[in-house]
Amino acid sequence: MGPAMSRLTITLDDDIHQALKETAARQGRTIGQIVEEGLLLRGVKPIQSARRLVAMARGNAQLSEEEALDIATSETRSARE
């Protein structure tokens, strides 16, 4: 059995929606797959991913958990601006 899936309704500009449908058809993928990939590329990741990254960074830098979380939070905010 695969991961749990949720449904989401969004409102898009008609031209963007049409372009998204055409892209999905051209690539043989679903709209959901394209949207999910775009979110991942923009840094929207499950909390488990963030925790793994923090654990790796903490181990490599020999930081306390609090220090590593502070750095990760700061870097994430900077990347989203």
Image (spheres, rainbow, N blue to C red):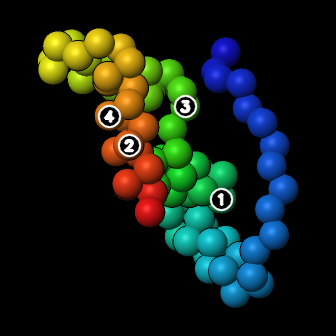
Q: Earlier in the sequence, mark 3 or mark 1?
A: 1
- Residue 38 horizontal/vertical position (percent): 51, 57
SS at circle 4: helix
Residue type highlighted by circle 2? Ser
Residue type highlighted by circle 3? Pro
Q: Kindly identify which residue carries mark 3.
A: 46
- Residue 76 horizontal/vertical position (percent): 41, 45
SS at circle 3: loop
Q: CA distance from mark 2 to mark 1?
A: 32 Å
Q: CA distance from mark 3 to mark 4?
A: 18 Å
User: Is residue 52 shown to the viewer in this render?
Assistant: no
Q: Kindly identify which residue carries mark 1.
A: 31
Q: Residue at point 44% right, 50% down?
A: 77
Kindly indicate whether the residue at mark 2 contacts the one at mark 3 (C-beta within 8 angstroms). no
- Residue 9 horizontal/vertical position (percent): 84, 56
Q: Which mark is residue 8?
A: none
Q: CA distance from mark 3 to mark 2?
A: 18 Å
Q: Which mark is residue 74?
A: 2
SS at circle 1: helix
Q: Residue at point 56% right, 57% down?
A: 34
Locate residue 74: give its quadrant: top left
Q: Earlier in the sequence, mark 3 or mark 4?
A: 3
Q: CA distance from mark 3 to mark 1?
A: 20 Å
Q: Kindly identify which residue carries mark 4.
A: 71
Q: Residue at point 45% right, 57% down?
A: 80
Q: Residue at point 52% right, 45% down?
A: 44
